[in-house]
Structures are given as C-alpha cells and as structure tokens.
Amino acid sequence: MATKTTYPRLGTRALNRATLERQLLLRRAPRSAMSAGDAVRHLVGLQAQNVKPPYYALAARLADFDPEELSTAMADRRVARMVTMRSTIHTHTADDCMALRPLVQAARDRELGQFRTGLAGVDLGRLAAVARELVEERPRTMKDLREALLVHWPDADAFALAVAARCTLPLVQVTPRGLWGRSGQVALTTAEHWFGREPEPAPAPDDTVLRYLAAFGPASVKDFQTWSGLTRTREAFDRLRPGLLVFQDEHGTELFDLPEAPRPDADTPAPPRFLPEFDNLLLSHADRSRVVPLEYRTRTWKGNQAHCTVLVDGFLAGVWRLEETKDTTTLSVQPFAPLTRAQRTEVAEEAAALLTVMFPAAAHDVRFGEVVGEDG
C-alpha cells in the first residue's frame, strides 16, 4: 500500500506572515524600490469595484505613497480598469490587461451562459463584431451599448446584450473614470484600442500561477482557483511541482510555494493596516483563516457591500469608515474585540498616517467606536 507523503507543516500564523510579506503589508515597500505601477504588477492587480479602493490598497503597502502617482499612470494608459479575475473589476498594468483577460476568458464564457435565455437567436460572433465597432468608434457606457445593440437584436434582453459585449470583448474603463479626485461615469472601449496593441493569444496558466504564489502564497490549487475564477488548474501545478516547495497547512491541505519566496517567522511583528473594501488579501484564498479568524468570517459584509477592514497583529480585527466634511476628515474604527492600550495607540498612529497621505490639506480626526458584536 502506498504511503501518503508528509510535507512540512505551516501553521496559521506562519501562513499569515508569509502572505503579509508578499502583499507588502508586513513592511511597506520603499518608493525607491517599487513604484505604484510596480506594485500593481507585483500584486497581479488591485480589486477595484469602486474608484478609491486601489489608492487605499497602495497607501497600505507603499512608503510615501502619493495618490497622484497611480492616477497619472492611469491617465497615461500604463494602468487601467477592466473585468478580469472572479468577473470583477481590477486595476491592472497595461501588460496584464492584455495577458490576463485572455487567460480568464473561459470564466467569462461560463458567466455568459447565465444569460442564454435573453440572448436566444443572437449570434455572439456578430454581436462581438458590432460591439467592437461601437466602442472603438467612441467609448460607450453600458446604457449606450444596450441601446445600440437593441437596434440589431430588438427581441433580445437589453441587459443580456450588454453583458455579452462585456464577456466577449476585453473592455477597459476609459479615463477620467478611476482618476484620483476626478469623477466620470463608466465608459468602455477595447483594450487593444486603448493601449494601441494587437490582441494576445490566451497563455497557459503556469506563469500566472507563479505570480500568484509570489503575491499570495504559500497556497493550494483551490486557493488559486478562488482568486482567478479558473477551474481545472491542477495540471498547471503538477507541471510546476518539480520547481516548487510543497507544504501542508494545519488541516493537511497541500500548499505550493516558490523556493526563494519569503516565509518570515510566525512571531514577526505585524503593524496595523487599513485596507479598503474588497481588498484582494481577504478574497484570494479558498481558506481565508490565514487572515480572517473563523469567528469574524461574516463580519466584513453588509448585503453585497464589503466594509473597509483593519488588521491588528496581521489578522482582521475590525472595520473602519471615513466621514468627510468641509473642514475635517474623520476616520472611525470599530474593533471586533477590545484592543490593548498599545494596540489602540498603534492603530491610531496608522490611521493618522493614512489620513495625512490621502487628505494632506484637511484637518484629521481619529475616533474609536464601541466594540462591534456579532449583530453590530
């Protein structure tokens, strides 16, 4: 009888510290070593359902971060916003927009299957061609797309037509949407048109697996699939296995990692960090216990909206929100459990630093609310 291979075990705190280090949350990367664009690439994108979260995500990860740096990169078309992993909007570098979207196209095809009833009789190849011509003529809102596509398919469901265009084409959100301190509705064109490049063939997932491990590892096959939205990726891990280290977590799940990747001691200090809603740190593993304590797993959401979160000692420890008035920006912290005096001081200092970076011209105030209970 074959015996099951036993690999070195990594406890929850060891996984936490390793992931925080890869995520630039254990210590901020100095500006001289990593630009905003470098960080976006290293992290394989920033979740960006809303405009501001990518800026707060980088403020937590880069020393001396200036929001205008990311905004300028977006205005210069070096980074952009588009639907990629998990069918959600991410801020990516131009290179990743071109490479990652073909990689996750199979997931977009599966998503499109949910709308087959509303697309009865619609030739998706022709729809893609018509939609491409429309958005490359000028950027279009989803409302514009719905109305224009209904002219060609008047019996189809208007919403399904627009979703089909988004699923079949690599559409990016054009500026001024996404710029710091600016506003603008979502308007779309193709990645090829926006970046002035030819489309790329869908790559094998191997390189993306390695990049995922560099930013989120050590991790399991299911972790990668949770992050990417892809299925049937075990073969990629098996191809890569000879060049990877293999561990197991406290439940015996097999974890893969890059040999040269950092794995700090489990007792390495982890300073407080303020993360935006939908931060990838909390969404990119099948087992989120490396960051989210079991008792808090349902505490960061209200309906479909995620709360902004605060880490203490590397783990989810509460939520936070901003209140902006004409004269003052107030950051309010609501912990999930009582903080020690030292933790409270550290959290207040980190909050004040964040406000200084993001709102340099405003007066600042940091407040602590009551401990948030299970029903709070």
Image: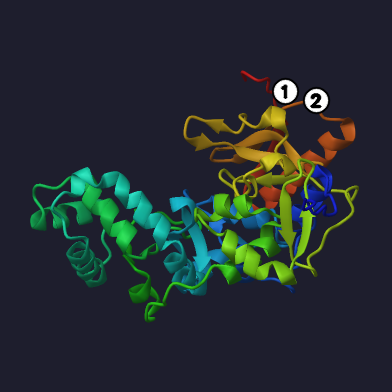
Contact? badges 2 and 1 (CB < 8 Å)? yes
In this image, 76 relative to 341: left or right? left
In this image, 170 relative to 285: left or right? left
Q: Which tag, 2 or 1, sits closer to the chain's start?
A: 2
- Count neighbours of disc 2 (C-alpha within 10 A) and say few if under 14, some if 14 to 19, many if 20 or more: few
Q: Is residue 336 visible?
A: yes
Q: Residue at x 91, y 47 (%)?
A: 267
Q: Residue at x 10, y 58 (%)?
A: 152
Residue 321 pos. (x, y %): 60, 36
Residue 248 pos. (x, y %): 78, 50
Give 94 or 298, whichever is nearer the viewer.
Answer: 298
Place residue 213 in its image quadrant: bottom right
In the picture shown, does residue 214 fall above or below 253?
A: below
The Cα–Cα distance between marks 2 and 1, rounded to whole angstroms, is 6 Å
Give 376 or 252, whichever is nearer the viewer.
Answer: 252
Q: Give the numbered dot on residue 209.
A: none
In the picture shown, does residue 191 fall above or below 270?
A: below
Residue 40 pos. (x, y %): 59, 65
Q: Which residue is mark 2?
A: 338
In the picture shown, does residue 246 fall above or below 280?
A: below
User: For the image shown, how many numbered marks are present on the structure?
Assistant: 2
Q: Residue at x 70, y 61 (%)?
A: 62
Place residue 217 in its image quadrant: bottom right
- Count neighbours of disc 1 (C-alpha within 10 A) and say few if under 14, some if 14 to 19, many if 20 or more: some
Q: Which residue is mark 1?
A: 371
Specify the color scheme: rainbow
